[in-house]
Amino acid sequence: MKLKEIQEFVKELRGLSQEELAKKENELKKELFDLRLQAATGQLDQTARLNEVKKQIARVKTVQSEIK
């Protein structure tokens, strides 16, 4: 992700409620699981997507902790 995309993503996250953030985190965790499964079976084409999703999960958790 580019810097502008990251800033937009974080701005979007800050506008969400705690429940919506938890839902977003669960969606990203499911996507990460699916990507790991694809990587293990050799079907993953975009290997950089793994790290991208991990960082997005961390951003969601950071915004959740800012709200608390």
Image (cartoon, rainbow, N blue to C red):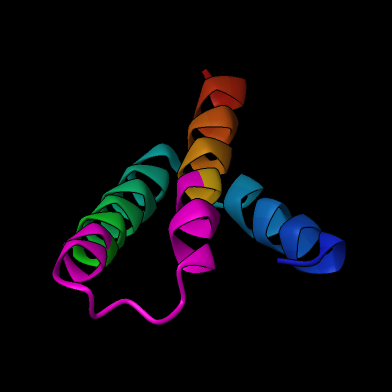
Please report the residue visible at 70 percent of the width from the left and 66 percent of the height from the top: 1
Looking at the rendering, which quadrant does residue 9 occupy? bottom right
Left-right relation of 40 to 6:
left
The residue lying furthest to the right in this view is: 4
Decide which of 12, 58 is in the foreground and name it.
58
Q: Position of residue 26 (x, y in %)?
A: 26, 50
Identify the residue shown where x is 68% and y is 51%: 10
Instruction: Residue 51: say if magenta.
Output: yes
Q: Residue furthest top?
A: 68
Position of 26 compared to 11: left or right?
left
Q: Which residue is located at x 62 percent, y 23 percent?
A: 66
> Is residue 45 inside the magenta stretch?
yes
Vertical arrangement, residue 67 with respect to residue 23, above or below: above
User: Does 1 sit above or below residue 54?
Assistant: below
Range drawn in magenta: 36-54
Residue 44 appears at what percent x and percent y?
A: 32, 76
Residue at (18, 61) in percent of width and height: 40
Q: Position of residue 15 (x, y in %)?
A: 62, 52
- Between 34 and 64, the residue placed more toward the observer is 34
Please tell me which residue lies in front, 64 or 4. 4
Residue 15 versus residue 67 in the image, above or below:
below
Q: Main secondary structure of the magenta part?
A: helix
| Displayed quadrant of residue 38 | bottom left
Q: Return the x and y of residue 61 as percentages of the image width and height.
A: 48, 32
Query: Is residue 38 shown left or right of residue 32?
Result: left
